[in-house]
Image (tube, rainbow, N blue to C red):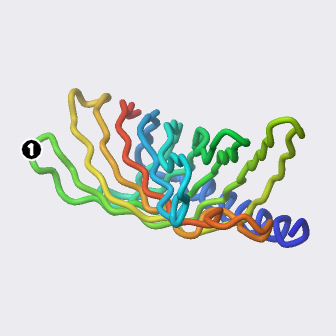
Amino acid sequence: MLKAGKALFLVFLGSSIFAYAGTAAAQGGYAGISAGQVEVSDFCDDVIIECDDSALTGRIYAGGFFDKYLAFEGGYRFVDDTTIEDNTGSINVGYHMFDGSLLVFTPELGPVRLFAKLGAQFWRQDLSVSINGLGSASEEESGVSLRTGAGATIDITDSFGLRLEWDYLQDIGDDSSGIQNLKSDVHVFSAGPEFRF
């Protein structure tokens, strides 16, 4: 998995360098932060003990427009732990993610613009298993997955607005450790301020 993870990281790094070069020539830039909730779709499937497949998430991002309707952006997302637990122990899974996406915008609808996006997501999955009286162990996995989504920006001023969005992240995680449900699609619902320059 280590060699595969390095190869996937190099692919992601190459695409990020290409994207950075394109963004440098963009016609307008923006940056923002967002917070919201993640649902890890398969995490609690067939689990009969206490299980929480949702977690808080935060993201920072920046991007630039190539023209009025097409933009590229990159970002970093942190996802807090999802948890399976009972009186014998617990399994906690969290994520760190770096992403790059192309965004396509509609014309202005008053102060609102809608958008759709498509890109790639480099993820690292942090797994921690704790058994009462025996101790704990941890493991990391990484990979690259498809990301897509849609949302809306709402202009408050020319340089400041609000962004609402839904992200769909496909096949995040790795279940090769033998623990089921660690590979799953992820849905993210978030909102936050956006700054234009």
Q: Front-most of 186 and 69?
A: 186
Q: Which amino acid does label 1 sit on?
A: Gly
**Where 11 falls versus 53 (above or below)?**
below
Q: How many marks?
A: 1
Residue in the image at 60% along x and 44% along y? 83
The image shows residue 124 at horizontal and vertical percentages of 72, 53
For the C terminus, give its image quadrant.
top left
Q: Is residue 94 above or below residue 43?
A: above
Q: Residue 21 sits in which quadrant?
A: bottom right
According to the picture, the residue beneath numbered tag 1 turns out to be 110
As drawn, the residue found furthest toward the left would be 110
Image location (x, y in percent) of residue 31: 46, 36
Residue at screen point 66% across, 65% down: 15
Left or right: 173 with respect to 65? right
Looking at the image, which residue is at 31% across and 40% down? 163
Q: In this view, does 54 lie to the left or right of 11?
A: left
- For this rendering, which residue is in front, 28 or 40? 40
Q: Is mark 1 on a helix, strand or loop?
A: loop
Q: In which quarter of the image is residue 118?
A: bottom left
Q: In this view, does 152 lie to the left or right of 34?
A: left
Residue displayed at 59% across by 38% down: 80
Q: Quadrant for the N terminus, please.
A: bottom right
What is the crowding at mark 1: few (fewer than 14 residues within 10 Å), some, or many (at least 20)? few
